[in-house]
Image (spheres, coloured by chain):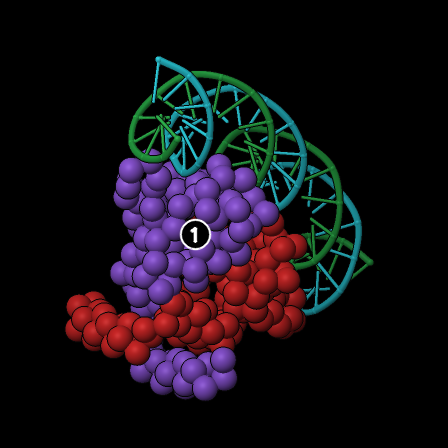
Chain colours: A red, B purple, C cyan, D green
Amino acid sequence: MRLDQAQSDDTGAVFFALADPTRRHLIEALGDGSSVTPSALAAELPLTRQALTKHLGVLGEAGLVTKRREGRETRYTLQPERLTEAAAWIAVVGGAWEERLGRLEALLQERRSGS
Amino acid sequence: MRLDQAQSDDTGAVFFALADPTRRHLIEALGDGSSVTPSALAAELPLTRQALTKHLGVLGEAGLVTKRREGRETRYTLQPERLTEAAAWIAVVGGAWEERLGRLEALLQERRSGS
DNA sequence: ATTTGATGCAACCTTGCGGTTGCGTGGTCG
DNA sequence: CGACCACGCAACCGCAAGGTTGCATCAAAT
């Protein structure tokens, strides 16, 4: 999909952001409420700082992350609202979401005891 | 993202499929358990039959839809399992999913009475 | 047998994504 | 000030995504 189209398509932007493994990894890393800087990420991952900056930019456009300048570094933090909305879209497709929500809870229970 | 990568990345493939507005529209249309044929879709949407076939192919690669040949036409049907898994991934990112699940339920309740 | 309708396959085109490199800029510390 | 570190911006590259057209194929209807 084209990015300019994704900008005028909130839901699409979120799913587009989640489609990339690197971006999902970043979200998982930020899941605990911590913040990250591009350079720090570049030290851990096999990617350039600029590449990470672009990824964080995509996450930002999707409203999944916020940047905050702090001295000479920029810290990125997760913004979970859009995530919940996306999950809601999935759960509601085609109705019968009551049943699906039940299965979702079951899945979460499994995953909780599993890992 | 590259498609071959998406194939070896189930979660990514699902989100990638959901990133496209047309594909989401198809999923919404199939949400009631009905089935669709590419030509019928091409009559309703401003897209070629082949374009729709490709989209349905992407949905198929993501495991979101199944094709079944029926006489001379091919009917596509929704396969909701992967959708639930994707919602589960979203709900579980970064822990604190109990709270998020609560908000999700609230969102769904709103959407139920709303539309 | 012919014709008509629904597909499948493949080539082709344009645009954007993911990634890099190079350079300019703004804080920080000695 | 001068050196350094973390960024931002822009150009560039390879390749896949989304879309089209054209043609071959298979099933059904007359």
User: Is any atom of residue A76 visible in this view?
Assistant: no
The image position of residue A53, as x and y in percent, is: 58, 56
User: Is any atom of residue A63 visible in this view?
Assistant: yes
Q: Which residue is mark 1?
A: B17
A23 left or right, relative to B46: left
The image position of residue A86, as x and y in percent, is: 45, 69
- Does A40 sit above or below residue B87? above
Q: Tell me the element at label 1.
A: helix
Amino acid at the residue labelled 1: Ala
Q: Residue at x 34, y 48 (%)?
A: B76
Question: Which of the 4 quarters of the picture holds residue B95?
Answer: bottom left
Question: Which of the 4 quarters of the picture holds residue A66?
Answer: bottom right
The image position of residue A93, as x and y in percent, is: 40, 67
Q: Residues within 10 Å of mark 1 (few under 14, many from 20)?
A: many
Chain letter of disc 1 in the image: B
Question: Which of the 4 quarters of the picture holds residue A29?
Answer: bottom left
Closest to the observer: A43 or A52? A52
Closest to the observer: A55 or A101? A101
A29 left or right, relative to D14: left
Please state the total of marks drawn on the protein image: 1
C21 left or right, relative to C9: right
Closest to the observer: B29 or A109? B29
Q: Residue at x 40, y 46 (%)?
A: B37
Q: Residue at x 53, y 46 (%)?
A: B43
A2 left or right, relative to B115: right
Q: Residue at x 59, y 47 (%)?
A: B46
Closest to the observer: A71 or A110? A110
